[in-house]
Amino acid sequence: MTAPPFLGSAGPSPTPSAGASGGAHGLAIVELAAAAVFVTLGIRSLVRWLRSDYRPEEPGERVLYALHVTARVGMWFAFAGFFAGYALVDEPQSFRGYVLVPLALAAIQLLTGVLLGLEPNPKPPDAPPDG
């Protein structure tokens, strides 16, 4: 009894380098192209944020805004680094910890976005009304 064709053969599967010529090399080119796209998007994002007309007034707001913009632009470069690293590292399994970089940048972006969106000096609930 033979196995259906969609199940494949029972023997060992060929390694990526044993397949068609240029298979692994072609994959690295696709990953490097994706990295180049993310670098381009990162540069575009940086230019866009540098042209922003928002000017924080207090030093604390300036720090939060700088962290927010850095995290936002850094996400694009982190994704570019992920694809470039995956294409260029000999053992991609050792590159797994890099996933924490985009997660940390996303957390910083979320936290700074929330803090920048808060009212500057909220009144306590028992404060007398103005006027």
Image (cartoon, rainbow, N blue to C red):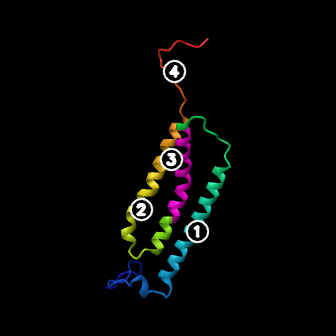
| Mark found first going from the N terminus, 3 or 4 | 3
Q: Residues within 10 Å of mark 3 (few under 14, many from 20)?
A: many
Query: Quarter of the image holding residue 97?
Result: bottom left
Give me the disc on residue 105: none
Distance CA(mark 3)–CA(mark 1): 23 Å
| Mark found first going from the N terminus, 3 or 1 | 1
What range of the chain is rendered magenta?
61-80
Which residue position is annotated with label 3? 109
Distance CA(mark 2)–CA(mark 4): 43 Å
SS of the residue at dot 2?
A: helix
Residue at 55% across, 59% down: 76
Q: For this rendering, which residue is in front, 65 or 113?
A: 65
Give me the disc on residue 98: 2
Above-or-below relation of 130 to 61: above
Above-or-below relation of 120 to 95: above
Which residue position is annotated with label 4? 123
Quarter in which the C terminus is drawn: top right
Disc 3 and disc 2 in contact, CB within 8 angstroms: no
Quarter in which the N terminus is drawn: bottom left
Give me the disc on residue 36: 1
> Does the stretch in magenta take in 54?
no
Q: Residues within 10 Å of mark 4 (few under 14, many from 20)?
A: few
Disc 4 and disc 1 in contact, CB within 8 angstroms: no
